[in-house]
Amino acid sequence: MNRIYLIAFTILLFTNNLIGQDINEYVGSNFKLGINVGPNHNSLRGDELAEGYEPNINLFTGLSFEFKVNEKFSILTNINYEVKSVKTEYTTTIGFWTNYQKIEIEDKTKFQYLNIPILARIYFGFENEFFVNGGFFYNHLFDVNNKMINKENGEDLSELDFNELFNQNDIGISLGIGVNFKINNQNSMAIELRDDLGISNIGNRDFGSISPTSTNTIKFIVNWSFEL
C-alpha cells in the first residue's frame, strides 16, 4: 500500500513540473481526498460460454485522490475494493451408464478485486460543475469463488478452485462522465457513470481450459471529497 501512495505522489510532482510552478501552490488547496461507494454491473466478453453468463449487480467502495492542476484539469486515482459476479443456469447429467439423471445447475462466480484507475479529468460548464475523465485501470484479483448449486435440492456441487483458472491481473481502459455539486468551500459531492473496459485476458491459459475472456464493468459512483 505504501508503494501505491508513492506512485500517486510521484504523479502529482511530475504534473506540477510540467506546468512549471511550485508544488506548494497546490498542495493544501488543490489536493482532494474522497470516499467512493456505489453499485457496479459486470459482464464477461469472449466466446459463447463467457457471454452466456448473466451480469450481476454488486457494490464497491474505496478512496479517491485528486490533484487539480487548474480549474479545468485534474489528475485522479482511486483505490477501490470491488466485488464482481456473474451467473448462468444449465442442465447436466450425473451418474454412469444407465444409472444417471439430468439436473438443473445454477452456476455463480464471484470475483474480488483491488481496482486502481489512473485518470485525467476535464471540467466544463458555467461553473465547471460537469466533468469527463479517461485513462486506464489496473485490477488485482484477490479471490474467485464459484458455486454450482443443484436447483432441485440445493446441494453444492463445486469441486474446482477457480483461483487456478484466472489471471491475477486485469488491465483496461476507463471512461467516465459526471457532475460535481459544491457543498461549501472545502466539501463537494460528485456523481459519475464510469465504464471499465478490460483489454487483457483474465483466463489463465496455463491451465488450458479457459478461452480468452475480458471484463466490462459499468459503475455508478457517488463520491464525497474534501480539500486538504
Image (tube, grey):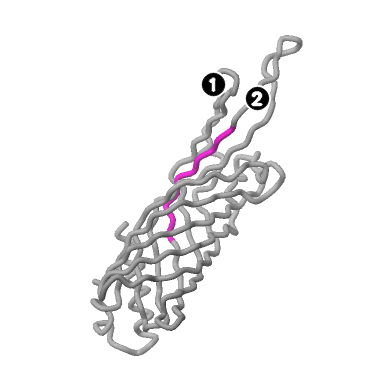
- Report the span colored magenta: 107-116
Magenta stretch: dominant secondary structure? strand
> Which image quadrant: the C terminus?
bottom left
Residue 128: percent from left, percent from top: 41, 80
In front: 87, or 172?
Answer: 87
> Which image quadrant: the N terminus?
bottom left
**Secondary structure under the numbered disc 1 in the rendered image:** loop
Q: Is residue 121 magenta?
A: no
| Quadrant in the picture for residue 153 | top right
Q: Amino acid at mark 2?
A: Glu
Q: Residue at x 59, y 56 (%)?
A: 200
Q: Residues within 10 Å of mark 1 (few under 14, many from 20)?
A: few
Q: Residue at x 72, y 44 (%)?
A: 48
Residue most toward the right? Answer: 98
Residue 155: percent from left, percent from top: 54, 20
The mark found on residue 104 in the picture is 2
Looking at the picture, does residue 39 appear above or below residue 19?
A: above
Q: Is residue 109 magenta?
A: yes
Q: Amino acid at mark 1?
A: Gly
Q: Residues within 10 Å of mark 2 (few under 14, many from 20)?
A: some
The mark found on residue 73 in the picture is none
Q: Residue at x 59, y 23 (%)?
A: 151
Q: Residue at x 40, y 77 (%)?
A: 74
Residue most toward the top? Answer: 99
In front: 168, or 157?
Answer: 157
Looking at the picture, does residue 113 appear above or below residue 102?
A: below
| Quadrant in the picture for residue 89 | top right
Residue 138: percent from left, percent from top: 48, 59
Residue wearing tag 1: 154
Residue most toward the bottom? Answer: 20
